[in-house]
Image: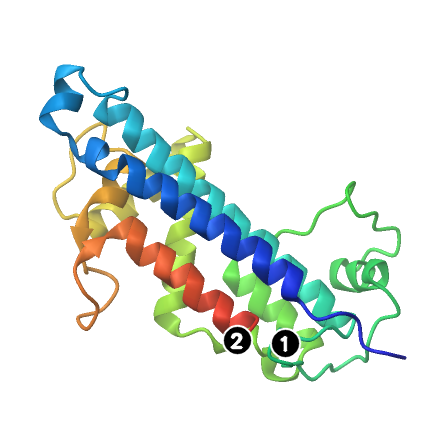
Amino acid sequence: MSNKPALISARTIFEKRLQSAMNLYCYVEAIANGTWDSISGWEPLHPRQAQKIVALCFMDIVTGLEDFVESCFIRYLAGSTSPNGYKPSLRCGQTSSILHAYQLASGNPAFKVGSHYIQWQSWKDVMEAAKVFFEKGEPFSLLSPLQRDRLLDATKIRNRVAHASAKCKKDFGVISRQHVPKVHQGFNAGQLLIDKSSKCFGNTVPTRSYFMHYWALFESAAQIICPK
């Protein structure tokens, strides 16, 4: 059985999604932080509107990472290689097709792409599944504990952007106070993401906005999962 094509397409799509989000973030960051012109109404956006755009950019790249993880997981099962030729060791053998890989990963022989879905939000669940199909769960198990913790936070921040449930609000409140000690009522995801600090990301990283910290995290995670 020959190997399936390398994962160049999946990697390229995710990189473009990251860059698109970064471009839009850079465009609205100053407005989101509140310039005199934006507060006075001379800018096309109010700071609150710009903060919402930052939050939506973040939501898009978190969702993009989940799509990327799915593409890599499924295609590795089908025998694909990363752009640099990396190929994880399969514990159950190579699947005969992408559909077969979905059926195996989901445990559903009737799985239909586009109709059925596999959840990739929990990195703990991703690693547990990876250990079933790949030796040592690699490459998904190679992320550091700090990277795994921040990916969990990223999912909760994204969920707050997308949902207004009591649980999402509570989870976001906990994460906000971990990142920014002094938060106020009405504190939103956009405000968190434009806050500049290195808290929660280690003492060796530069001080920059949390959007930038998370963006760099997604980029580094992609290199571990699907090395170029």
Disc ID at residue 91: none
Q: Which mark is residue 141?
A: 2
* Picture residue at 51% right of the left edge, 57% below the top: 15
Work out whether residue 65 can be spotted.
no
Residue type at mark 2 is Ser
Q: Residues within 10 Å of mark 1 (few under 14, many from 20)?
A: some
**Which amino acid, by three-letter code, is at mark 1?**
Lys
> Where does the C terminus fall, quadrant-wise?
bottom right
User: Which quadrant would the N terminus be assigned to in this image?
Assistant: bottom right
Classify residue 14 as left or right of residue 197: right
Whether residue 41 is situated above or below residue 161 in the rendered picture = above
Q: Quadrant of residue 89?
A: bottom right
Give 46 or 201, whichever is nearer the viewer: 46
Q: Are marks 1 and 2 in contact (CB under 8 Å)?
A: yes
Asked whether 168 or 47 is in front, the reply is 47
Q: Does label 1 or label 2 sit earlier along the sequence?
A: 1
On the question of residue 82 being in view, the answer is yes
The image position of residue 136, as x and y in percent, is: 60, 83
Residue 47 position within the rendered picture, expressed as x and y whole percent measured from the top left: 22, 26
Q: Which mark is residue 131?
A: 1
State whether residue 21 is above or below residue 188.
below
Residue found at the very far left of the displayed protein: 36
Q: Secondary structure at mark 2?
A: helix
